[in-house]
Image (cartoon, helix red, strand yellow):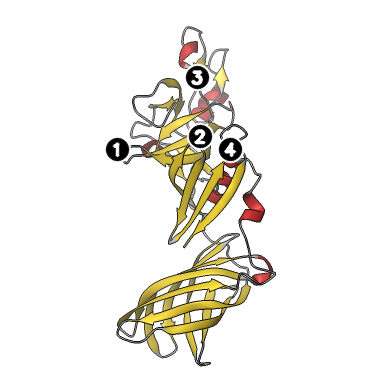
Amino acid sequence: MKIKSVLMTAFCSLVVGGMGNVIIEPLTANAQIYRDRTPTEVYDGEGVLTDRDPNGRINLRTDPSWRSRVRGYGRVGDRVEILQETRSREGEMWYEVEFLDSGEIGWIPGENIRVADTGSGRGESIRLSQRGQGSFQISGRPDWEITLVTVNVDERDQAELAFRLDDNRLIRLSGDLDRRDAYTLRIDIEGSGNANASGTVDIEYGANNSINQIYGDGRLDGQPFSISFDGDRRSDNYYDPRREFVGEDINNAVRRLRSQGWKVVESDPGMIKLDRGQMGIDLQFNPRTRRVTSVRTID
């Protein structure tokens, strides 16, 4: 990975592409091989610089704006660590990045970065169970109250969800695991017993196989349905994100959340807001110490 300060252009440094080596001596055959290498795999929390021109330069700016000062540049294929993201007033996505080799930090427009997909945790079974309160709504019918939810995902990523109602009836949904990380599951619904069903269910889970929240919607036998559920917060195993992020460096907290699929939707001095599906987290931090002071989850 390479980055060359604009202020250093008076020096005779030769920067080659691909691996970002700064070569003082004449270009060698080995350096020429590096020039042709463009990384294809992107890891969680990282990005790769891209451009329509494979030999183009991507400017590194001091702020997330085209009008901000250019403090350096990178090349197509350079790897960077994503620190945070935000949208400009014009609605364009910008990423604050750190070049892995040089440590240089700045802002690059989203059109010039390919970021990692979170994917799902494959091949591991999981079983969740939680009492709480929620509702299962089907268009044209009275709401059903949910008192208990169980979730089972097997090694083949086949998922089964069971919703126990207050009248002791049971609603079952089945589907495939679409995405999994340390905090959430996303399940694509494909059936409900003999009934046709489709949709998506997002599950936020915590320690000891607990369930914090569930949101979902889709169609059941041709009718729109929606699910909302909150786990019993009095339970000892209820997951509270405040226990994990309060006191942590804000950049580290955002980096961890991004690696789990959260997206920064707003960034202000002292506050960063992230969303994932219908869930949200607001991180408030001290601008001086950069430590998280409070965490708020959004339904």
Image depth: mark 1 or mark 2 in front: 1
**Secondary structure beneath label 1:** loop
Please name whichever residue, 236 or 31, is drawn nearer the observer in this view of the structure. 236
Up-down: is 256 above or below 24?
A: below
Measured from the top left, where is residue 144 in percent x and y? 43, 85
> Which mark is first along the chain, 2 or 1?
1
> Is 260 left, or right, of 237 in this rendering?
left
> Is 277 left, or right, of 250 in this rendering?
left
Q: Amino acid at mark 4?
A: Asn
Q: Which residue is mark 1?
A: 90
**Secondary structure beneath label 4:** loop
Q: Which residue is mark 2?
A: 97
Q: Do the numbered discs 1 and 2 sit on residues whose CB atoms are within 8 Å? A: no
Q: Which residue is mark 4?
A: 286
Q: Residues within 10 Å of mark 3 (few under 14, many from 20)?
A: many
**Secondary structure beneath label 2:** strand
Please name whichever residue, 163 or 179, is drawn nearer the observer in this view of the structure. 163
The residue located at (61%, 74%) in the rendering is 128
Q: In 3D space, how far apart are the residues under numbered discs 1 and 4 (Cα atoms)? A: 27 Å
Q: Do the numbered discs 4 and 3 sit on residues whose CB atoms are within 8 Å? A: no
Q: Which mark is residue 4?
A: 3
> Which mark is first along the chain, 3 or 4?
3
